Amino acid sequence: MKKVKRLLAIIGILLLVSMYILTLVLALTDDPNTMNAFRASIYCTVLIPVLIWAYTFIYKLLKNNYGDTSNESKKRE
């Protein structure tokens, strides 16, 4: 689980940084799509961490429900 969280965090960081750099480049070049990129950056700043959290939460639930049952049998003994 730690490796999955770390991988998702790295992917999230790369996505956010690339969005910020793209927005900065568009702003410096006076592109007409700068405001759209800025809105997308703000949207992704909130959406990406929420999606990563939701993925890890669902992963935990599924792992506990359908995962290895040997831990439960050890607890009962």
Image (cartoon, rainbow, N blue to C red):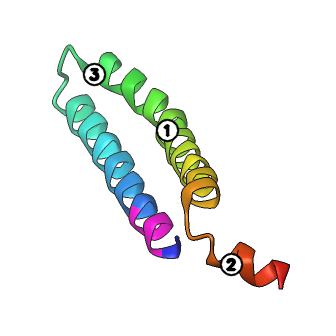
Question: Which residue is drawn at the image coordinates 50% and 40% (left, top)?
Answer: 51
Helix, strand or loop for disc 2: helix
- Closer to us: mark 1 or mark 2? 2
Question: Which residue is drawn at the image coordinates 68% and 78% (left, top)?
Answer: 71
Residue type at tag 2: Asn
Closest to the observer: 33 or 7? Answer: 7
Residue type at tag 3: Thr
Left or right of 4 on screen, residue 27:
left
Above or below for 45 versus 42: below
Disc 3 marks which residue?
Answer: 34
Decide: marks 1, 2 in contact (CB < 8 A)? Answer: no
Q: CA distance from mark 1 to mark 3?
A: 16 Å
Question: Which residue is drawn at the image coordinates 32% and 17% (left, top)?
Answer: 36
Q: Earlier in the sequence, mark 1 or mark 2?
A: 1
Residue type at tag 1: Thr
Decide: marks 1, 3 in contact (CB < 8 A)? Answer: no
Disc 2 marks which residue?
Answer: 71
Left or right of 66 on screen, residue 31:
left
Q: CA distance from mark 3 to mark 2?
A: 53 Å
Picture quarter containing residue 24? top left
- Closer to us: mark 3 or mark 2? 2
Helix, strand or loop for disc 1: helix
Above or below for 34 versus 12: above
Q: Earlier in the sequence, mark 3 or mark 2?
A: 3
Read off the magenta span: 3-7
Q: CA distance from mark 1 to mark 2?
A: 38 Å
Question: Which residue is drawn at the image coordinates 24% and 39% (left, top)?
Answer: 22
Disc 1 marks which residue?
Answer: 45
